[in-house]
Amino acid sequence: MHSPAIAIQRTPLVAVYGTLKRGLRNHHWLNNAEFVGEDTLTTATLYDLGPYPGARLEPSRGISVEVFRVDSRCLTNLDRLEDYRVRAPATGTYDRMIHTTAFGPAWLYLCNLDVSGCPAIREGGWLPSDRSSSA
């Protein structure tokens, strides 16, 4: 359980892998964040949930993430977007956990939804099926 104010004290970095990436439909939520760089994580696997992906802590050949430096206001907004529930993280759509990146520890949103039958992405990144609606 980490409120955004406490979470930012632990690390101001967030690693994103889906619609929050640059050029995709929810990136505007990171307009005031500083882009730090790109990384590849081998300890997470993405699942294609249709309109967005979800990550699980499962080994992969390397999924692509973008790392941003955020403030507590931005993290609060991301928590709202990702349906992260501070008091009961397992009941929201996503949980938020610290994950190691090339730029240091970063928050990574992990999917709580059932991913049975969803295509796994164990290498590379997720792309929306309709790229024209993602800009």
Image (cartoon, grey):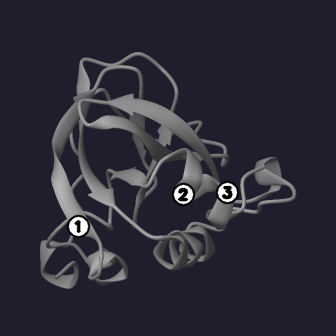
Of pointers 1 and 2, the one earlier in the residue sequence: 2
Residue plotted at (74% across, 59% down): 92
Name the residue that disc number 2 marks. Answer: 8
Left or right: where does residue 115 sit relative to residue 15? right
Q: Disc number at residue 48?
A: none
| Mark 2: amino acid | Ile
Q: Is there CB contact under 8 Å for labels 1 and 2?
A: no
Residue 1 vs 115, above or below: the answer is below
| Mark 1: amino acid | Glu
Residue plotted at (29% across, 58% down): 68
Q: Is there CB contact under 8 Å for labels 3 and 2?
A: yes
Name the residue that disc number 3 marks. Answer: 6
Q: Is there CB contact under 8 Å for labels 3 and 1?
A: no
Name the residue that disc number 1 marks. Answer: 34
Q: Residue 113's x, y, as percent?
A: 66, 49
Helix, strand or loop for disc 1: strand
Q: Quadrant of the C terminus?
A: bottom left
| Mark 3: amino acid | Ile
